[in-house]
Image (tube, rainbow, N blue to C red):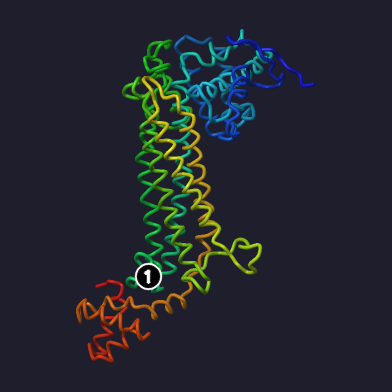
């Protein structure tokens, strides 16, 4: 039989596992929200941010004379343990929950209280000494703690996201340099268009990924404004004078993230506009990645009956029935990540719109979706670079073969014979299966010297 301890709240009593550092409000939330199976412990970065907020609050309350030094010291030490990665297994509440994040906040309050009690040599649940609400949650509300911790979590994750973006850009630029000598068919609407360099194609990939680094930095800055100290609805009820500025300053010091107070705490408590904007940048990153992966799959298609201009690295067998088939599984999984991020962004939008009066109770689903999007993008870009981009090879012979057999060079004849005549030549070459050069020379439309000038590499690539 599992040993238990009895705890009570305003609703009644419950048996709690004796060795659990969470308490009765957490236990009730576990019973009430068996929804996704994704617990708070699935996102340790969020748990660490919650502990940082609680530590900053304890420091501020101690300085303002609201919390006895020995109680504050125990709470701060407990928070330090959690920030270092300890006790995360006791954060058992589902990420998706009713109550605007109250269950998450209370899970943190109870774990911190019980860890602090143990540090003081007291038994778990001895809340007369350190109470989850009266001490750990002092001068706070879920409505300022939860959104502040969430913003902090996203800001702390941004450097890793930017790092993988930069690494992906570098890998794509390396391929741009490697493939700069490969001339190929450029295509619009999946139809042959004009010649281009394969290196230019990869350079465009690099540039489009790099653009979003600056956008991410720009819109992440919106998350730096927090409503900590506003408590329930932003009026700051139950806080000592000067608490908000002080606790935010301490949180910035604890976390290393330059947080600032929101201009209007009431507005900041109910509005989730910054999350909508930030999520839209994640969607933009995902859309661009998916487009790049679509292109990689097309360029790799075949290997003999498709385009086949590049060869993606073979990372696993592609079929249980077709011997030798190798699928572009890495671009495919990144496509699927993009679909999920795009869907997550819609969920974030709907959640932000659902706010009512002085609070938005739908924050938990918004938090789950943004954190999931960030994590999937980080992992997806890392896998794309390591297991796909760096190993891509160009099939130079295939690129030359397709270029020579196409009609794309006819565009270069416009200045010499005009658009209508060039169009007729293209149709004639297609009908008779001859090259553009052969048709032009056979009909005496241009001299050999003029054709050499028109079909020079510089002219075909638009270089003057």
Mark 1, residue position: 197
Q: Quadrant of the C terminus?
A: bottom left
Residue 9's spot in the image, x, y percent? 60, 11
Which quadrant of the view contains residue 205? bottom left
429 to 137, vertically: above or below: below
Of 253 and 414, nearer the camera is: 414
* Quadrant in the rendering for residue 359: top left
Is 9 or 425 nearer to us in this picture? 425
Q: Say above or below: 30 vs 393.
A: above
Looking at this view, name the residue that lies furthest to the right. 1
Horizontal side, residue 463 vs residue 7: left or right? left
- Frontmost residue, 360 versus 104: 360
Q: Is residue 327 left or right of residue 217?
A: right
Name the residue furthest top: 128
The correct choice, above or below, for 43 with respect to 311 in the image is above
Name the quadrant of the N terminus: top right
Question: Residue at horizontal 44%, vertical 26%?
Answer: 147
Tell me residue 160's x, y (percent): 48, 43
Left/right of residue 124 with respect to residue 392 in the rendered view = right
Q: Position of residue 129 (x, y in %)?
A: 61, 9
Question: In this picture, is 245 found above or below 163?
Answer: above
> The residue tagged with tag 1: helix, strand or loop?
strand
x, y percent for residue 73: 56, 16
Residue at screen point 56% across, 35% down: 43
Mark 1 closeness class: few <14, some 14–19, many ≥20 residues within 10 Å: some
The residue shown at (69%, 12%) is 6
Identify the residue at horizontal 50%, vertical 48% (top origin): 337
């Amino acid at each position: 039989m599992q040993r238990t301890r009895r705890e009570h709240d305003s609703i009644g009593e419950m048996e709690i596992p004796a060795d659990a550092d969470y308490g009765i409000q957490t236990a009730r939330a576990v019973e009430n929200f068996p929804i996704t199976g994704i617990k708070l412990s699935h996102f340790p970065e969020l748990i660490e941010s919650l502990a940082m907020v609680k530590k900053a609050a304890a420091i501020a309350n101690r300085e303002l004379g609201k919390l006895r030094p020995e109680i504050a010291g125990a709470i701060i030490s407990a928070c330090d343990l959690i920030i270092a990665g300890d006790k995360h297994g006791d954060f058992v509440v589902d990420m998706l929950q009713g109550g605007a994040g109250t269950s998450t906040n209370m899970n943190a309050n109870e774990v911190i209280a019980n860890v602090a009690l143990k540090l003081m040599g007291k038994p778990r649940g001895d809340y007369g000494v350190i109470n989850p609400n009266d001490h750990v949650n002092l001068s706070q509300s879920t409505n300022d703690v939860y959104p502040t911790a969430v913003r902090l979590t996203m800001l702390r994750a941004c450097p890793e996201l930017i790092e993988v973006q930069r690494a992906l850009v570098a890998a794509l630029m390396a391929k741009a340099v490697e493939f700069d000598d490969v001339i190929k068919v450029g295509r619009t609407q999946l139809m042959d268009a004009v010649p281009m360099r394969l290196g230019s194609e990869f350079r465009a990939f690099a540039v489009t990924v790099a653009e979003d680094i600056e956008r991410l930095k720009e819109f992440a800055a919106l998350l730096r404004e927090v409503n900590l100290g506003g408590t329930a609805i932003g009026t700051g009820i139950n806080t000592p004078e000067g608490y908000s500025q002080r606790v935010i300053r301490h949180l910035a010091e604890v976390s290393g993230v330059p947080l600032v107070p929101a201009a209007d705490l009431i507005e900041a408590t109910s509005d989730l506009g910054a999350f909508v904007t930030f999520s839209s940048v994640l969607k933009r990153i995902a859309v661009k990645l998916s487009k790049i992966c679509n292109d990689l799959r097309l360029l790799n298609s075949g290997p003999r009956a498709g385009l086949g201009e590049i060869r993606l690295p073979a990372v696993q067998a592609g079929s249980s029935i077709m011997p030798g088939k190798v699928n572009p599984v890495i671009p495919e999984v990144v496509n699927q990540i993009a679909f999920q991020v795009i869907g997550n962004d819609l969920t974030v939008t709907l959640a932000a719109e659902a706010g009512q009066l002085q609070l938005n109770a739908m924050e938990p689903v918004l938090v789950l979706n943004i954190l999931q999007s960030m994590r999937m993008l980080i992992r997806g870009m890392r896998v794309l670079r390591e297991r796909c981009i760096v190993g891509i090879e160009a099939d130079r012979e295939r690129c030359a073969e397709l270029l020579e057999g196409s009609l794309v060079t006819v565009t270069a004849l416009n200045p010499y014979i005009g658009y209508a005549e060039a169009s007729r030549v293209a149709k004639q070459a297609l009908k008779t299966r001859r090259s553009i050069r052969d048709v032009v020379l056979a009909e005496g439309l241009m001299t050999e010297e003029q054709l050499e000038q028109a079909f020079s590499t510089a002219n075909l690539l638009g270089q003057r």
